[in-house]
């Protein structure tokens, strides 16, 4: 293999493992789009040695994509192809309107905060920068969930920026950063991006590389400001230093990076935890309160103000569901109780290792934070489990709010414990079990996994 059109920059720390996604897979996504929406080479496409690979006018079908995939190109593929139908500001606004129709909390917030007209202007600006339209179209056609996440992120990012009283340019930059933050996925092996089920450590590293890949191509676009690029690169960093790719924290992160980081987390919460239960953004309040150190104070406060002004109410558990929710809550509380000593053991064992790489340090910090959150929340106490059992046996409507809030907190903690488990598994895979300490860490990691997913 000769190389690739997109390579991870050499400044990427190899210990991040982010240098996995060396090959650019954009041609494969284009070939799939081409099945329903013509994708044509607008000029002769040559490899880095000047050898002609694809003639101008040719369609980018599967065979052509496979040929391109084997070569490093002389210039980025996106600059040498055109789509027959491409998204523009009008279409994007139409997609946002559909999203707001499907999720009434989005419509409610937009109305209550009087953001509708301003957002329409943003989403059309100017025809959503035509240089980005190709990528956004491919994202919409091939990774619709990420496209929807982009729409949500652009909208909420801009709204948070406005609530923080940032200038018009920064509000616009927040919109673009939210919209484009996951375009990097379009360069990662589709076999990994579409994979169902658990990813290996190597696959996770490829997934995490989407921020660095986005950095490469967004930096080359004249319509994208450096502020937007930085926010996209930072959208998985967290204020407490537990994010990636650099683990930077606090004021080392840009204001927009902090905003898009919060928005990205809320989107994940909506899709992975709220969607099935019909919950709304107000249900994210316990998450925000629990994770207060994960986001910068002005961003956190702006988000809380938006929720307050929206007039949304937390989703209420229906009376006839109360016993079921109380039973489920008991299971989660028991799990939280059982994992506490495992977490303590993991933290202790990792502190005894002679050297921890970045992955290990980050896992240990996240585990310590989650342990602290469980203890602060008090959800591990016997009295609470007894109370939930009492509600299950004799459900009263006066218990609804408390049960609801506790379930949200417990769900969030279980979610975070799953992240700790994943990071720990990745750390064990990377380090191997060539020492007694690593053998013990791996055993605790397995125990944590079995407690979180019994059977
Ligand atoms: Fe992302």
Image (spheres, helix red, strand yellow):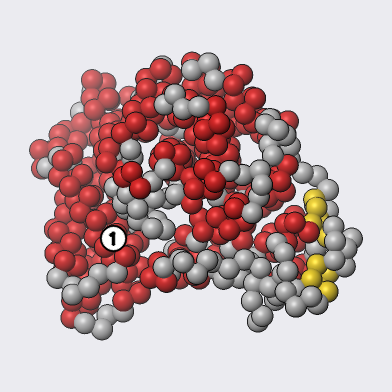
348 and 78: which is toward the camera: 78
Image position, residue 9 (x, y; %): 52, 66
* Residue lying farthest to the bottom in this orientation: 434
Q: Is residue 210 visible?
A: no
Residue at mark 1: C-beta within 8 A of ligand 1: no
Left or right relative to 112: residue 249: left
Query: Would you identify the image quadrant in which residue 376 lies?
Result: top left
Residue 228, percent across and down? 54, 43
- Find disc 1 in the rendering and name its residue: 363
- Residue shown at the point (69%, 59%) measured from the top left: 29
Residue at figure coordinates x 27%, y 80% from the top left? 433
Q: Quadrant location of residue 406?
A: top left
Residue that appears at 52% across and 36% down: 174
Task: Left or right? Give the position of 68 relative to 427.
Answer: right
Residue 195 visible? The answer is yes
Q: Few, some or many C-alpha atoms within 10 Å of disc 1 (few <14, some 14-19, many ≥20)? A: many
| Residue at 48% over, 17% down | 113
Compared across the picture, whether 124 is left or right of 276 comes to right
Q: Quadrant of the N terminus?
A: bottom right
Judge left or right: residue 274 versus residue 439: right
Q: Point out the image quarter for the C terminus.
A: bottom left
- What is the tally of numbered marks visible in this picture? 1
Q: Secondary structure at mark 1?
A: helix
Front residue of 223 and 423: 223
Q: What is the x, y in percent for residue 88?
A: 73, 37
Closest to the observer: 117 or 43? 43
Q: Is residue 78 above or below residue 25?
A: above
The image shows residue 155 at horizontal and vertical percentages of 54, 32
């Amino acid at each position: 293999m000769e190389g690739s059109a997109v390579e991870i920059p050499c400044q990427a720390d190899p210990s991040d493992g982010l240098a996995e996604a060396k090959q650019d897979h954009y041609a494969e996504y284009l070939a799939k789009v081409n099945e329903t929406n013509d994708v044509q080479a607008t000029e002769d496409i040559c490899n880095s040695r000047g050898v002609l690979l694809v003639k101008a006018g040719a369609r980018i079908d599967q065979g052509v994509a496979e040929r391109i995939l084997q070569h490093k190109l002389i210039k980025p593929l996106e600059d040498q192809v055109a789509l027959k139908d491409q998204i523009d500001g009008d279409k994007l606004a139409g997609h946002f309107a559909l999203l707001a129709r499907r999720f009434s909390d989005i419509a409610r917030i937009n109305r209550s905060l009087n953001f509708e007209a301003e957002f329409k202007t943003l989403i059309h600006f100017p025809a959503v920068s035509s240089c980005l339209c190709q990528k956004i179209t491919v994202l919409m056609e091939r990774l619709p969930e990420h496209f929807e996440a982009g729409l949500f992120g652009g909208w909420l990012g801009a709204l948070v920026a406005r609530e923080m009283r940032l200038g018009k340019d920064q509000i616009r930059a927040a919109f673009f950063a939210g919209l484009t933050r996951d375009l990097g996925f379009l360069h990662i092996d589709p076999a990994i991006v579409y994979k169902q089920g658990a990813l290996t450590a190597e696959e996770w590293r490829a997934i995490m590389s989407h921020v660095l890949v986005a950095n490469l191509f967004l930096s080359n676009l004249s319509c994208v400001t450096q502020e937007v690029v930085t926010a996209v690169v930072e959208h998985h960093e967290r204020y407490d230093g537990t994010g990636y790719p650099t683990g930077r924290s606090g004021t080392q992160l840009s204001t927009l990076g902090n905003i898009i980081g919060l928005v990205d987390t809320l989107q994940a919460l909506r899709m992975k935890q709220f969607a099935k239960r019909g919950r709304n953004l107000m249900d994210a309040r316990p998450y925000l309160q629990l994770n207060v150190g994960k986001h910068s104070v002005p961003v956190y406060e702006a988000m809380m103000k938006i929720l307050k002004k929206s007039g949304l109410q937390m989703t209420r558990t229906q009376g006839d569901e109360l016993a079921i929710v109380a039973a489920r809550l008991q299971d989660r509380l028991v799990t939280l109780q059982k994992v506490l000593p495992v977490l303590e053991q993991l933290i202790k064992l990792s502190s005894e290792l002679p050297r921890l790489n970045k992955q290990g340090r980050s896992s240990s910090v996240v585990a310590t934070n989650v342990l602290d959150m469980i203890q602060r929340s008090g959800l591990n106490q016997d009295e609470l489990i007894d109370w939930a059992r009492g509600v299950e046996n004799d459900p009263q409507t006066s218990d609804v709010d408390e049960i609801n809030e506790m379930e949200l907190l417990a769900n969030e903690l279980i979610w975070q414990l799953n992240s700790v488990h994943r990071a720990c598994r990745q750390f064990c895979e990377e380090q191997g079990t060539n020492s007694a300490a690593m053998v013990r860490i791996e055993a605790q990691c397995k125990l944590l996994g079995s407690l979180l997913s019994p059977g």
